[in-house]
DNA sequence: CCGCCCATTTGCGGAAACGCAAAGACGGCG
DNA sequence: CGCCGTCTTTGCGTTTCCGCAAATGGGCGG
């Protein structure tokens, strides 16, 4: 037994998907859970596979990436602790539409897909939570799509960095530090551009004192300035 | 009474959201429904409003558009008959995140939001259907985002046109005819570009015999060629 | 302490797309 | 039949951004 069951139970009780379940139901959830640690850059599941398990990130950071027809990887979402991965695939019983990769050493809870489906049939609160979570994710994607459709690359990268800071930011004396290793390529995949463009933007921003960029490492010195880059600048 | 209740009942029984409900439940759904006709370009609901009603398109065509920070409208999804509109906003009780506008004369069923919420609490099948629908929509958006992130404008417009044809295409002797009035601007908002670029692409495609483009009207003569434009062309 | 690996920078070139202005065409309405 | 409002075309300038090659640099293992 890798972990005392009590610890898993405590983790489960803090997960949004399981909100509103009573003590006995939470016990059942915890009992069926598996807790595992993954190193950085580990693959939790791959695009196209049948959905065998439902994952919830307990610690660390992960990303959901999709490979498009031309072979470019695009990061659809960065997953912070407490969030569910693969939920749509498991709920709908369709192949994983994307690949999940850890961006840092991570702790992951998981359940067999059939266990979750069976419990959803039995516990209305669970299905209601699932609907709420998937609904929120839909709204996020819609918003991202709207931005991606018309915004310039600088704005997209600025937004990506701010979103990342909200999920993996560590406040320090200097500013907000992204607490996981992050290459230019990583950010490019999130913002939908290439590593060269990110590099150029970083140089420009660093010169203006907005960020501090090191190898695999970024600190946001002036969040307000980044936010401003995000604001309505069009046609000029 | 605008329609015999029997007609509404028949419509309801063919809607995916209500699949698996028994006769009595369907009666209840039909009884609470309102059926209304809208002219082209009517607004069903607007971004930011509180979600008072849930809509299902019974006939015609509609689009869901979102205005981004810079004020550009982006069409997130085109809605064909049988599909639900506003579902996420109603299910989660958040303001409509986008605006719904008819693209043709349309017939629309609708229900008060609280009626749907109350029934969802009572009927597990309804919530299960809702989860499935929202899950599918999430997958669609994710796919669109992945394309939008890296694909060239020509590819995006080609995809948009094919998607549209699948929803509002009429097979004719010449090819697939889009059966609703469609301006260059409309397609630009779907593909995330501007009307000039669409116009230029149309000229080029028409010259190659791929499409027939008239004012507010498109016919796809060679779907395979369009499909090919969509295929893996990068870096060249 | 050296060398290697990998992330990153940087320059240059060119293609893709946007932005705008103004003319042109199509259709409907009076 | 002609006017008018819309949608559409088209030319041109300009910006943005990709795409690649090659140099640079930092950090870790040996």
Image (cartoon, coloured by chain):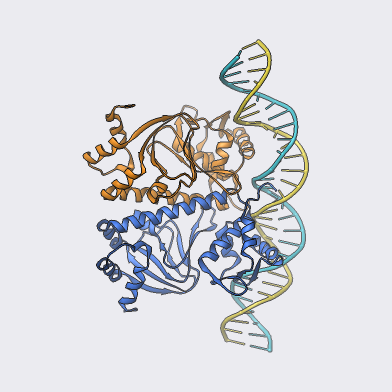
Chain colours: A orange, B blue, C yellow, D cyan
Residue B24 picture location, percent across and down = 24, 68
Residue B93 in view here: no
Location of residue B229 by image quarter: bottom right
* Up-down relation of residue A218 to residue B110 (above or below): above
* Up-down relation of residue B161 to residue A204 (above or below): below
Q: Nearer the viewer, residue B219 or A129?
A: B219
Residue B214 in view here: yes
Residue B199 picture location, percent across and down = 66, 64
**Residue displayed at 26% across by 44% down:** A20
Q: Nearer the viewer, residue B116 or C20?
A: B116
**Residue displayed at 57% across by 51% down:** B148
Location of residue B208 by image quarter: bottom right
Residue A189 picture location, percent across and down = 56, 41
* Up-down relation of residue A208 to residue B7 (above or below): above
**Residue displayed at 50% across by 49% down:** A144
* A167 relative position to D17: left or right: left
* B122 relative position to A36: left or right: left
The quadrant of the rendering that contains the N terminus of chain B is: bottom left
* A208 relative position to B51: left or right: right
Residue B134 picture location, percent across and down = 40, 55
**Residue displayed at 54% across by 64% down:** B164
Q: Nearer the viewer, residue A196 or B69?
A: A196
């Amino acid at each position: 037994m890798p972990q005392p069951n009590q610890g898993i139970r405590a983790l489960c009780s803090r997960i949004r998907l399981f909100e509103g379940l009573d003590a006995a139901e939470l016990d059942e959830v915890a009992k069926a859970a598996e807790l595992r640690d993954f190193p950085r850059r580990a693959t939790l599941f791959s695009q196209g596979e049948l959905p065998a398990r439902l994952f919830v990130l307990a610690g660390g950071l992960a990303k959901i990436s999709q490979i498009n027809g031309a072979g470019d990887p695009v990061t659809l979402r960065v997953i912070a602790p407490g969030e569910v991965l693969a939920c749509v695939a498991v709920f709908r019983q369709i192949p994983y539409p994307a690949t999940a990769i850890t961006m840092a050493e991570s702790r992951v809870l998981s359940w067999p897909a059939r266990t979750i489906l069976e419990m959803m049939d039995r516990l209305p609160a669970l299905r209601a939570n699932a609907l709420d979570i998937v609904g929120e994710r839909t709204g996020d994607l819609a918003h991202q799509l709207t931005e991606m459709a018309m915004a310039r690359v600088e704005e997209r990268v600025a937004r990506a960095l701010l979103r990342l800071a909200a999920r993996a930011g560590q406040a320090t004396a200097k500013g907000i530090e992204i607490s996981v290793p992050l290459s230019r390529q990583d950010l490019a995949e999130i913002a939908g551009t290439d590593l060269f463009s990110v590099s150029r933007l970083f140089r420009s921003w660093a010169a203006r004192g907005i960020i501090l960029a090191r190898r695999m490492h970024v600190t946001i010195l002036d969040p307000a300035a980044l936010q401003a880059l995000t604001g309505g600048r069009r046609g000029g």
